Image (cartoon, rainbow, N blue to C red):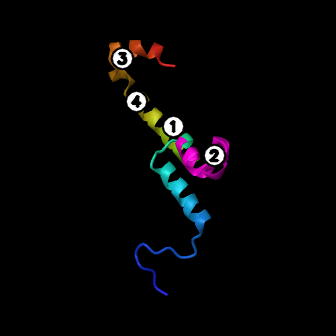
Amino acid sequence: MSTKPGEVHDANLHTLRKTAGARLIQKGVDIYRVSKFLGHSSVKVTERHYVDLLEVDYQDMSALLEDSTKDDSKVSETRASGWGRVA
């Protein structure tokens, strides 16, 4: 049996739902919105199901922070003075 574009074999509602959640997370939708969309009882439920994707996301964020510190010498005094208000 050949597969045509757009055909999904051996998929059920659970696999389609899991794929939707994974794709939303991979596209950068925050975990709270994904949790609400999927109807999970709490964000912790969503985190348990997608922990592998979230760990990659956290690694990506860590790399972004590391890259941003390389440019600290280029930060203007005005911007730097406003950072104390961010928390």
Q: According to the image, label 1 marks what residue?
A: 62
Q: Nearer the viewer, mark 2 or mark 3?
A: 2
Distance (Cα) linking label 4 and label 3: 16 Å
Judge from the rendering whether residue 39 lies leftward or rightward of residue 84; answer left or right.
right
Q: Amino acid at mark 2?
A: Glu
Q: Earlier in the sequence, mark 1 or mark 4?
A: 1
* Residue furthest bottom in the image: 1
Which numbered marker is on residue 53? none
Where residue 41 appears, x then y in whole percent?
A: 67, 45
Q: Earlier in the sequence, mark 4 or mark 3?
A: 4
Q: Earlier in the sequence, mark 4 or mark 2?
A: 2
Q: Nearer the viewer, mark 1 or mark 4?
A: 1
Judge whether 1 appears above or below 44 on screen: below
Q: Earlier in the sequence, mark 1 or mark 2?
A: 2
Q: Amino acid at mark 3?
A: Arg
Judge whether 20 appears above or below 3 on screen: above
